[in-house]
Image (cartoon, helix red, strand yellow):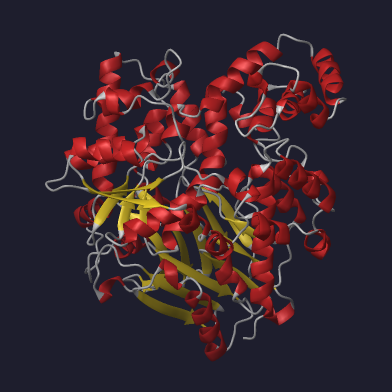
Amino acid sequence: MCGFAGFLVPTGFGADVARATAARMGDVIRHRGPDDGGIWLDAAAGIALSHRRLAIVDLSPAGHQPMSSASGRHVIAFNGEIYNHLEMRARLEAEGLACAWRGHSDTETLLAAIDAWGLQAALTAAVGMFALALWDRQLRTLHLARDRAGEKPLYFGWQGEGHARALLFGSELKALRAHPAFAAAVDRDALVQFMRHGYVPAPRSIHRGISKVMPGMVVTIDASGAVTRNEAFWSATQAMLDGTANSLVLPEQEAVNELERVLRSAVAGQMVADVPLGAFLSGGIDSSTVVALMQAQSSRPVRTFSIGFHEEGFNEAEHAKAVAAHLGTDHTELYVTAQQAMDVVPLLPSMYDEPFGDSSQIPTRLVSHLAKQHVTVALSGDAGDELFGGYSRYAITQRLWGKLSRIPLPLRRAIASALRSLPETAWNRLAAFGPGGLRGSNGYARLGEKIHKGARAMCSPALDALYLELVSQWSDPASLVRGGTEPATVLTQADPALASLAGVPRMMALDLLTYLPDDILAKVDRAAMSVSLETRVPMLDHRVIEFAWRLPMEHKIRDGVSKWALRQVLYRHVPRALLERPKMGFGVPIDHWLRGPLRDWAEALLDPRQLEAGGLLDPAPVRRAWAEHLQGVANRQHQLWNVLMFQAWKQSVDADRNAPR
């Protein structure tokens, strides 16, 4: 795992200034690679690459980057791991195309494969997670590529004017901002998307003119700086469509056997490292499955890590401890206080480098920090929900749409209008005359919040719109951002390619394309890399993804129980009694903190003058939500956390921009 940055100036540049600039871009992402650093540039061609290395495979200087291929044609800056690189080496040798190996790094293997087979074929053969910048010295072209599922980040975009105009690229936005040409303002349309989702969906970033390379794509830029190709070497959409069109027809136990075989292979491939390795363990289905398959293939106890909270309803550590004891892992747990968790909040703007509103970012950072004290690589159970139908919102949305779709849309809209004609506070006052169940656990009635949310859902013209409503944090985010409009995504505008998918499979597909790479994977990557910890996700081996989409839905959700097939695999290793409990999630009590110990911090960021600064946000709806949250008439934690994360990020970026160089 590493980080890289670079720039392309078609008119060329002075070597000394360019080297200093590349060094500065690399230095700001040193946390991604504290073990080594390197710079490569060709002043006449106008290309510079800067790399920071976290040594995982081949710890010797033979793994130094940027790295040139044996032919001298290609130079690469690479972030990630190619798990099957030894098999790729063997194939190259069998074909008589291998070079004289300098070491045993996966980067050297990939370069040799690119020399021999070409970039597209090499990436298709590779099993791994990665982002890379590849300069072809012969054709004077730059290739930017990202792994199939989007585990590793990669930003790029043009900045500056005239001879100073440069194409900037890198693993994190802070590296791009370190270049003197960078001057990108906040993209108001991207900010609208952030307020809805709590993340900025790819291909946009929070900065105007700066994009994310999409998962499974290769962007090719010629010597003049023109994007000549943007093509896929693998498509999640196509994998999902192919899987559903070629559904497995196997007895259920044979299907479970095959799932275990595919998962075992993926886990085994990701256990290869020249440094200490372990796993995150929450005690849930996904992480327990990964750890069980690790331990089944390990001759020694696997190192596992979990954190616990003293707050009831947020602590999974005791469940993780029980699973670890049964499997015989070498388990480490840490119970953290609310203050320790809140101490992470000031770090978030720099850590996430882009506004990011998923509050589970806090425990993710804490467990990453714990693991890093013992290992350099940690496997995680992410993606089980998206691949095996784990989110409760899938069943809720389908059940709700089944009822709503029977009522004509005009009638539903009329009912919703009538319900919304009474303010939330008025509904809350009415709750005082109803049964106690209408009152929240904190003593405040929130009937109005539920009725207004239900009324918005009633207006949904289709299942996609209903799902969007249920996963949105601000339902009308464009009204919050001055001068902003909401760009279309697969969540807001139906993708014709997904037309054959309906119901739960459709929602799973939408999450695999959006929520998983842009929220879950970004959250884990930034939190782990902030402490120089590599994370690996076995369930995102593309062969697991392809197999999961061939499993019939009855093998995923059965009798109201999600992840049926995955559970059958796990029950072979861990007793059901240790696992059968309601899904808890991985969060912190933001709603209570905002009314208590974080109130002053939040009030400062939500001050009307702060909200007005820059002319980006309309203070009125924010202040209204803040007042409702403080009064307890509604739980606005998600909406407010998005605003707070943007405000804190903007404040951090402005301070950095104004700091003396």
Q: Residue furthest left?
A: 299
Q: Is residue 375 above or below residue 60?
A: above
Expressed as whole percent of the image width and height from the top left, the position of residue 319 reads 32, 36
Side (left or right) of 258 relative to 167: left
At 38% from the left and 39% from the top, the residue drawn is 316
The quarter of the picture where the N terminus appears is bottom left
At 30% from the left and 61% from the top, the residue drawn is 376
Q: Is residue 660 above or below residue 5?
A: below
- Between residue 52 and residue 609, name the one nearer to us: 609
Expressed as whole percent of the image width and height from the top left, the position of residue 92 reads 25, 56
Expressed as whole percent of the image width and height from the top left, the position of residue 166 reads 64, 74
Expressed as whole percent of the image width and height from the top left, the position of residue 241 reads 50, 28
Side (left or right) of 389 relative to 321: right
- Between residue 275 and residue 44, name the one nearer to us: 275
- Between residue 255 and residue 469, name the one nearer to us: 469
Q: Is residue 626 visible?
A: yes
At 59% from the left and 76% from the top, the residue drawn is 178
Q: Is residue 500 above or below residue 78?
A: above
The quadrant in which residue 353 appears is bottom right
Side (left or right) of 152 relative to 413: left
At 40% from the left and 33% from the top, the residue drawn is 546
Counting every numbered tag in the picture gives 0
Q: Residue furthest top?
A: 406
The quadrant in which residue 571 appears is top left
Q: Is residue 473 above or below residue 566?
A: below
The quarter of the picture where the C terminus appears is bottom right
Q: Is residue 524 visible?
A: no
The quadrant in which residue 292 appears is top left
